Image: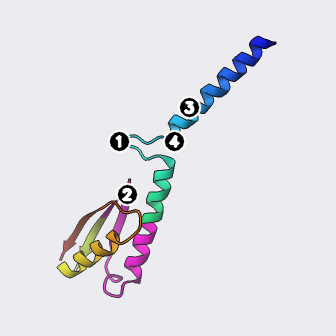
């Protein structure tokens, strides 16, 4: 009986360690919390870009990975590039902005 409790405890501890490691981030993979944070940041940036009268007519893609926002797409002027970058930087949780917008 005592032996079976030890085995059960060991299995429970092993499962807890596995669950903890599954949620931890690695250099190439976000943790669950980071993924959710990145999704919130992406949504906020997209919403602000869509609400901006100057930028809403351009198709700007937004992706976020570990707090770094990447903007891509085409815009009509350097002013639009600068304004989109400034909007993205102003969102809470953004660590950096990679502005890959192209002026056409």
The residue tagged 2 is 67
Q: Give the x, y percent position of residue 29.
A: 40, 44
Alpha carbon separation for disc pair 2 and 1: 13 Å
The reply, left or right, for residue 10 in relation to residue 64 is right
The reply to whether discs 1 and 4 touch (Cβ–Cβ < 8 Å) is no
Number of residues whose C-alpha sits closer than 10 Å to that of mark 1, classed few (under 14), some (14–19) or many (20 or more): few
Q: Magenta segment, which residues?
A: 42-70
Question: Which numbered marker is on residue 74?
Answer: none
Q: Is there a contact, CB below 8 Å, between mark 2 and mark 1?
A: no
Q: Tell me if mark 4 has few (under 14), some (14-19) or many (20+) residues whose alpha carbon lies within 10 angstroms of its own.
A: some
* Residue name at image x 18 percent, y 77 percent: 104
**What residue is rendered at 56% in x and 31% in y?**
18
Q: Earlier in the sequence, mark 4 or mark 3?
A: 3
Mark 1 secondary-structure assignment? loop
Answer whether residue 77 is visible to the viewer in this image: no
Measure the C-alpha gap from mark 2 to mark 3: 26 Å
Mark toward the start of the polypeptide (2 vs 1):
1
Label 4 element class:
helix
Up the image or down, 35 lies above or below 26; here it is below
Does residue 81 lie above or below 40 as drawn? Answer: below
Q: Which mark is residue 23?
A: 4
Q: Nearer the viewer, residue 9 or 71?
A: 9
Is residue 78 shown above or below 36? below
Q: Report the Cα–Cα distance between label 3 and label 1.
A: 18 Å
Q: Work out whether residue 100 can be spotted.
A: yes
Per the image, the residue denoted by label 1 is 27
């Amino acid at each position: 009986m005592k032996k079976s409790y030890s085995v059960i405890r060991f299995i429970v501890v092993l499962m807890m360690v596995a669950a903890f490691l599954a949620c931890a981030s690695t250099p190439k993979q976000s943790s669950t919390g980071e993924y959710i944070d990145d999704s919130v940041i992406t949504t906020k940036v997209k919403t602000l870009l869509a609400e901006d009268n100057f930028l809403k007519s351009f198709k700007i893609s937004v992706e976020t990975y570990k707090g770094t926002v990447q903007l891509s797409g085409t815009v009509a002027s350097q002013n639009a590039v600068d304004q989109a970058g400034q909007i993205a930087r102003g969102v809470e949780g953004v660590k950096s902005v990679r502005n890959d917008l192209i002026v056409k």
